Image (cartoon, grey):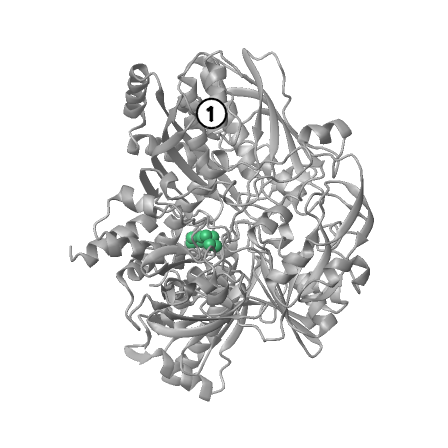
């Protein structure tokens, strides 16, 4: 079967790529576009390591076909910092030791940003609920939740 | 001062921006091939037909290899050469690699691997501990250690048994490797805790000396012991294909394959018989430890040894016999996992304490107090003296910090009022021995260069799997030279820079590599001092490296200026460092010696709530006091403690490995195998470091932290048991993992309504 041609916007830049019909968005990001920040932890939508947003909505890129990205706006971890200036979430994950091996970190950051974009002042329960789809085997989550809370507070100017 | 500071993880800025490169992220040349294994679908069988024609003609397939195509050693075992890379005529577990597919993409390789036509002649498979006991299937004769003479007419006696489930590592980054042929050499990137072993196995498979293979490991996305030996197969497969086709080769297991193929924490059944007095003080105890090692030996003997070494946990056992049965089964070959058998041995001991307390109707804390090591009661069952017996004081401190007694009373009151929801609390200690029990592994090397501009290049034999080892070792280098941490460049572990390394395991990473690094840095610093003393005509003791500069007498000089001058005066600014742990010696068959340089301690109190109609449960509050000696980096250490606790609690609660009666693993993805998630973290989580210098001369008097906190999770398990005990008279005798289903079943048994 011939390859599909996809035109999309990634982190604000318009991008074009070719993909097989069965390629996932995660495959396209990692293998074709060289954006390896999204990780494959399970490929079944259960770990959140591959999180990206599509038109602002959080999705597991392992569950979305690359071809479905046509005409959509995709945001990945690579676009989160404003050039050298880290997003407050990135800063608090780093300073609050909310990472160890770091492989879950991009997914958590993308998921947490999707939450704060919609709800700037989430309760702890809301944070836990929202991040329930992201697994971390290293940290035990305590520092992750705190980092999200601290980033939210900073972004609210609190 | 660089040590004792909460410096963030050295890779943190890369982690948060998605720029940290793991093996699967390394850009590979465009002619790279991708590999996948074809797996056995039987637990024990002869292969009567292996027709690979459909595999060979599948889309994108370039080559297919069976055992006959391997040019040299067909072995990926870390121990006794009993683990072929590819099966030879028969299979020994469900999921065993039988053939290797080489294709143009990962997906095509995986798809093709499913297309083989295989006929099997089934043989009887030993799947469970009970099967193996009945068939007397084992890797060696039982190991027995005895001190004193256990007897059965103590004032009180109890006996029982506990089933302890295994555990999937679930490192979020699956196993991965890549090999790139370069002239006569092979360059291997591997997500491994043990680059040196990868080097050895690859060299054996290619028929070359070790010096023709270079293995590099920058970082892993989690290891936990699961990448101590389990990466061998992928690296060897890549290297063989890379040599055969003269093309780069890459392999990663997708999650299901990873969970089906690779070994896990050993599951155990431990039987006990204990004799004690009215206070619960134990005088006689026997343990029979049965462990399912799986089909190949891997590291099982050492793991079973460590289960024996921690059978006492923090308690003195005057008359004790520990018998260890290392069972051979037709299941995945179980392997290293954080704690290395220690957690299983320790859990059984804590169960015994809990059982005694229930029987006597006194608080388990009182029974623990009666049994701690102490004056005149300080010999372990393996004849090592417990010199720094911290468990009693740490437990006492935790009891008051966590308000143990008041909460205990509140819980009793709550339970009396609440017919459906029941609470429970438990407080348990950890005493964990630090050192590899294979004595020769307790060595490490480092390589340090100081460039003429004063920048420092650091390499050592340890690997970074998220535990913050690189940061800690870099802190040591910065400390020796009085430089800021960012003056030290941390470089990937590389067998070409530091040879003959041990696995980064047994919590030993910073102890060993920190010391080796210090040794190398001090050699260079001593040369700088000698040079400066002569050049500036001061005595050596007038020279200080501090706050980014060098004070020579009262003259401050930038470090870079000194190094430049030293270079121009032909002073060597590169050094290797070496360290071997002192004081240890050990005879494992006899169970005698000093296997451990020192012990690391911890104490945890956990409160839980269960729903007696569903078995659902939550951790309400956890208080931890943990001993890391004089902390090298409190932020990293607390992270290890929190993560260790949650992982330990996961092992004993939600994480259940289910093999069916055909030996197939039915829980091979996160959809069915449940590791703790955000909501499982304790609602209140207080973690504190116990202020204490290591009495032994370790790197800046710190203590190892990787494994010991894992066993703090035992408190969650016993808190669940406590909650269940409030439902009736009988002792819960809870088995692990205490899944909701197990809890419900146990509640109903305690209520006298078994099902
Ligand atoms: S890789 Fe997409 S959710 Fe796990
Ligand atoms: S930091 Fe390792 S999985 Fe989260």
Q: Residue furthest front?
A: A1
Q: Kindly identify which chain the residue marked by label 1 belongs to.
A: B
- Asked whether B321 or B663 is in front, the reply is B663
Residue B716 in sight in this render: yes
Q: Is residue A49 left or right of residue B50?
A: left
Specify few, some or many for label 1: CA neighbours under 10 Å numbering under 14, 14-19, or 20 or more.
many
State yes or no: Cβ of the residue under disc 1 lies below 8 Å from any atom of ligand 2: no
Q: Is residue B65 left or right of residue B320?
A: right
Q: Is residue B636 above or below residue B537?
A: above
- Residue B100 position by quadrant: bottom right
| Residue positioned most to the right | B48
Element assignment for label 1: helix
Residue B591, image x and y in percent? Answer: 65, 37
Which residue appears at 65% of the width and 28% of the height? B146
Q: Which residue is mark 1?
A: B743
Q: On the rendered structure, is B643 left or right of B332?
A: left
B147 in relation to B639, above or below: above
């Amino acid at each position: 079967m011939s390859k599909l041609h996809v035109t999309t916007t990634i982190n604000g830049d318009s991008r074009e790529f070719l993909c097989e019909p069965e390629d996932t968005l995660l495959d396209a990001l990692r293998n074709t576009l060289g954006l390896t920040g999204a990780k494959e932890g399970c490929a079944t939508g259960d770990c959140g390591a591959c999180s990206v947003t599509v038109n602002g909505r959080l999705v597991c890129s392992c569950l979305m076909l690359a071809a479905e990205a046509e005409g959509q706006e995709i945001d990945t971890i690579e676009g989160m910092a404003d050039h050298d200036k880290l997003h407050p979430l990135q800063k608090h994950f780093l300073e609050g030791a909310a990472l160890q091996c770091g492989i879950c970190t991009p997914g958590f950051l993308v998921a947490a940003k999707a939450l704060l974009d919609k709800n700037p002042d989430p309760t702890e329960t809301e944070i836990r609920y929202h991040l329930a789809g992201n697994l971390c085997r290293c940290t035990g989550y305590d520092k992750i939740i705190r980092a999200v809370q601290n980033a939210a507070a900073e972004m609210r100017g609190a | 001062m660089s040590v004792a500071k909460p410096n963030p993880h050295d890779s943190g800025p890369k982690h948060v921006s998605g720029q940290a490169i793991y093996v699967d992220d390394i850009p590979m040349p465009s002619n790279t091939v991708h590999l996948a294994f074809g797996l056995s679908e039987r637990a024990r069988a002869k292969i009567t037909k292996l027709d690979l024609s459909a595999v060979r003609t599948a889309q994108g397939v370039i080559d297919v290899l069976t055992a006959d195509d391997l040019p040299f050693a067909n072995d990926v075992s870390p121990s006794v050469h009993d683990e072929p890379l590819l099966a030879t005529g028969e299979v020994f577990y469900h999921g065993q690699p039988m053939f290797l597919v080489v294709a143009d993409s990962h997906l095509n390789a995986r798809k093709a691997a499913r297309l083989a036509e295989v006929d099997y002649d089934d043989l009887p498979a030993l799947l469970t501990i009970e099967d193996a006991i009945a068939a007397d299937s084992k890797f060696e004769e039982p190991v027995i250690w005895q001190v004193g003479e256990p007897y059965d007419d103590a004032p009180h006696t109890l006996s029982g048994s506990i089933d302890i489930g295994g555990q999937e590592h679930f490192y979020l980054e699956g196993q991965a490797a890549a090999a790139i042929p370069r002239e006569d050499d092979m360059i291997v990137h591997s997500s491994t805790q043990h680059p040196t072993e990868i080097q050895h196995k690859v060299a054996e498979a290619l028929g070359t000396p070790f010096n023709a293979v270079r293995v590099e490991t920058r970082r892993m996305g989690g290891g936990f012991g699961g990448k101590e030996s389990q990466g061998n197969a992928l690296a060897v497969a890549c290297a063989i294909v890379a040599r055969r086709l003269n093309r780069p080769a890459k392999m990663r297991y997708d999650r299901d394959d990873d969970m089906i193929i690779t070994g896990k924490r050993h599951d155990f059944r431990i039987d006990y018989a204990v004799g004690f007095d009215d206070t619960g003080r134990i005088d006689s105890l026997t343990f029979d430890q049965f462990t399912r090692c799986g089909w190949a030996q891997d590291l099982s003997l050492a793991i079973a040894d460590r289960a024996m070494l921690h059978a006492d946990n923090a308690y003195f056992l005057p008359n004790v016999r520990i018998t260890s049965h290392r069972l051979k089964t037709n299941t995945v070959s179980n392997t290293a996992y954080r704690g290395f058998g220690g957690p299983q041995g320790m859990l059984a001991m804590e169960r015994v304490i809990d059982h005694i307390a229930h029987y006597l109707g006194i608080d388990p804390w009182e029974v623990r107090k009666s049994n701690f090591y102490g004056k005149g009661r300080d010999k372990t069952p393996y004849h090592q003296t417990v010199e720094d017996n911290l468990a009693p004081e740490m437990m006492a401190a935790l009891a008051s910090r966590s308000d143990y007694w008041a909460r205990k009373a509140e819980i009793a009151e709550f339970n009396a009022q609440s017919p459906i929801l029941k609470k429970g609390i438990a407080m348990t200690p950890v005493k964990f021995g630090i050192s590899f029990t294979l004595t020769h592994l307790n060595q490490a090397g480092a390589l340090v260069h100081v460039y003429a501009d004063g920048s420092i290049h650091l390499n050592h034999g340890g690997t970074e799997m998220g535990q913050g080892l690189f940061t800690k070792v870099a802190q040591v280098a910065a400390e020796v030279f009085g430089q800021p941490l960012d003056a030290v460049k941390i470089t990937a572990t590389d067998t070409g820079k530091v040879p003959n390394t041990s696995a980064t395991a047994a919590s030993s990473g910073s102890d060993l590599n920190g010391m080796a690094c210090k040794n190398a840095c001090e050699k260079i610093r001593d040369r700088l001092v000698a040079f400066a003393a002569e050049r500036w005509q001061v005595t050596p003791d007038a020279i200080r490296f501090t706050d980014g500069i060098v004070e020579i007498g009262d003259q401050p000089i930038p470090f870079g200026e000194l190094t430049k001058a030293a270079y121009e005066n032909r002073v060597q600014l590169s050094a290797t460092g070496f360290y071997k742990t002192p004081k240890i010696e050990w005879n494992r068959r006899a169970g005698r010696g000093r296997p451990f340089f020192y012990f690391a301690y911890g104490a945890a109190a956990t409160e839980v709530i269960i729903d007696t109609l569903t078995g659902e449960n939550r951790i309400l509050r956890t208080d931890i006091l943990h001993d890391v000696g004089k902390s090298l980096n409190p932020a990293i250490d607390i992270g290890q403690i929190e993560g260790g606790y949650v992982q330990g609690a996961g092992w004993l609660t939600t994480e259940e490995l289910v093999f069916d009666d055909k030996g197939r693993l039915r829980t091979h993805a996160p959809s069915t195998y449940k590791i703790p998630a955000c909501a499982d973290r304790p609602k209140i989580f207080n973690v504190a470091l116990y202020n204490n210098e290591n009495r032994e001369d370790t790197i800046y008097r710190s203590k190892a932290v990787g494994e010991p906190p894992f066993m703090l999770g035992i408190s969650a398990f016993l808190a669940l048991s406590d909650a269940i005990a409030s439902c009736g008279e009988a002792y819960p005798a809870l088995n692990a993992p205490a899944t909701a289903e197990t809890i419900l079943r146990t509640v109903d048994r305690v209520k006298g309504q078994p099902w």
